Image (cartoon, rainbow, N blue to C red):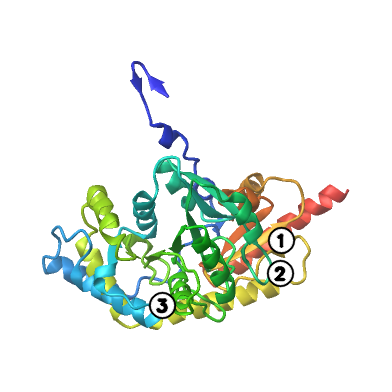
Amino acid sequence: MTAGAFTVGSSAAAAIAPSGIRAVADLAWRTPGTLQLQMGEPSHPTPPHVVDALAQAAREGNTRYGPTPGVPAFREAVAAKVVRVNGLDVSPDDVTVCAGGVEGLGATYRALLDAGDEILVPDPGWPNLGTLAVVCGAVPVGYPLLAGDHPGPDLDALDRLVTPRTQALVVNTPSNPTGGGFSEETLAAVLGWAARHGLWVVADECYDEMWLDEPQPCAALVAQRLREAEQPAPEVVSVFSLSKTHAMTGFRLGYVVTPPALTPVVRRVQETTLSCVSTPTQWAGAAALGGPQDHVEEMRAAYRSRRDRCVEQLRDQSVLTLATRPAGAFYLWLSYAGPEPSTDLARHLVTEHQVALAPGRAFGPAGEGHLRISLASADDVLTEGLRRVVAALGDRARVGES
C-alpha cells in the first residue's frame, strides 16, 4: 500500500488476515443484549491472593526493569510448578518469562524459523499459530486433525505435507478450538514422526491444567519417556500461559521451557522485543503458581459441569453435532448442516438472535462448517445461548425444507 511517496505497511503485515473471532466479538459488542459465547476468557475472577501480590509488589517498589529471562522468584515458582504438575525435570535456568503465551510462541518462532521456512500447524487450530509464522516471513502449513473420540494429527497427511523446508511441528492438546485431547499413545506417535523428520516440536501448553477427563502427559514428558525407552524423540519447546489456568488474561504472563541449547537464543529474541516482562506481574505470577491452587480445581469442575450439561442439552436436537469429544480446554466444537459459510452464520446469529459464537473458518479451512462455543461463560448465559443457537438453526432448517 502506498500513501503519496511513502510505502505504508510491510508485506508481512499485509499478509496477516484479520481475526474472524474478533470480527464477531466487535459485532457482538455493538449489538445490545448479545450473549457472548465466542471468547476464550474465564468467567471466574482472578484469585484474591494473586491480586494482592500484584498490589504488594507495586507498593514495595518492584516496578523497575527486571532481568530479560524473568524475575528469579517467578522462574523458581515456574520450575517448581513444571516439576509438580508436568512431571519434567527442569530448573529456573530452563525458563524464560514471556508476555503471555502468544508472545512466547512468537519468540520461539523467531528463534527457530528463517524467512521461507515452513512450520506445520493444526487445522483447525488457534489462528495465531499460523499468523505468528507469517510475521516471521515463514510459511504455516496446516495439517488435519482426526475428529471423534480419539483425536490427533493425521500422520499420513503429515507425510504428504512435510518438505525439506519444514523446520517445526506445532501441537496443542487439549485443543483450541476442538477441546479434543491427544492420548499419550497418539502424542508419542506424533513425536516419533517429528523426530524421524528432524523437526522441532513447539507445544502450545496453554490448557495444560484444563483437562476435563483423565489428564494426559504433556509433549515434553512424552518425549522424555521416548528417550528413556531409547526411541526417537524430538527436541520440544513448551509454551505455557497463566491466562486460562489462573484467570489472568489481562496480566499477559506466560513462560517458555526450552532445551538448554535454545534457551540463550530465545532470550536474545526476548531482549530485543520487550526487554523484560512487567515485574509486578511476575510477582503476581509467583503467587499464582506458588500459592493456593483451589481456584484451578474450581474452574475445572465448573467447565466439566458445563460441558456435561451442554452435551445433554444437545441430545434432543438434530441441527448441531458435537464433532470432537471435549476432553479438555473449555470449548465445544460443533458441526452444522448446510452450505452457509460459518462466518456468515455467526454474523446472522449475532444480528438476528443476539448470540455470538466463533466461526469455524476462523480456525483454518478445515474449520468450515463448524462453530465454537466457549464454556468459559456463566452457566445461565451458556444455557440460554445454546438454546438460541439450536432454535435459530432449527428455524433455518425448516425454512430450507419448505
Q: Which residue is mark 2?
A: 314
Residue type beneath disc 3: Asn
Q: Position of residue 255 (x, y in %)?
A: 33, 64
> On the image, which quarter does residue 186 sit in?
bottom right
CB under 8 Å between callouts 1 and 2? yes
**For the image shown, how many numbered marks are present on the structure?**
3
Asked if labels 3 and 2 touch by Cβ distance under 8 angstroms, the answer is no
Q: Secondary structure at mark 2?
A: loop
Mark before the other along the chain sequence, 1 or 2? 2
Rounded to the nearest angstrom, the CA distance separating label 1 from label 2 is 8 Å
- Looking at the image, is mark 3 or mark 1 earlier in the sequence? 3
Residue 387 in which image quadrant? bottom right
Q: Which residue is mark 3?
A: 86
- Residue 390: image tag: 1
Helix, strand or loop at disc 3?
A: helix
Compare residues 25 and 117 and report the one nearer the observer. Answer: 117
Q: Classify residue 328 by image quadrant.
A: bottom right
Calculate the distance from the C-alpha at mark 2 to the C-alpha at mark 3: 34 Å
Tags 3 and 1 touching, CB below 8 Å:
no
Q: Is residue 154 among what the camera can see?
A: no
Q: Which amino acid type corresponds to the residue marked 1 in the rendered image?
A: Val
Q: Amino acid at mark 2?
A: Leu
Q: Nearer the viewer, mark 1 or mark 2?
A: 2
Left or right, 248 with reference to 386: left
Using the image, determine if residue 222 lies above or below residue 157: below
Q: Crowdedness of circle 3 by 10 Å Cα count: few (<14), some, many (20+)?
A: some
In this rendering, which labeled residue sits more in front, label 2 or label 3? Answer: 3
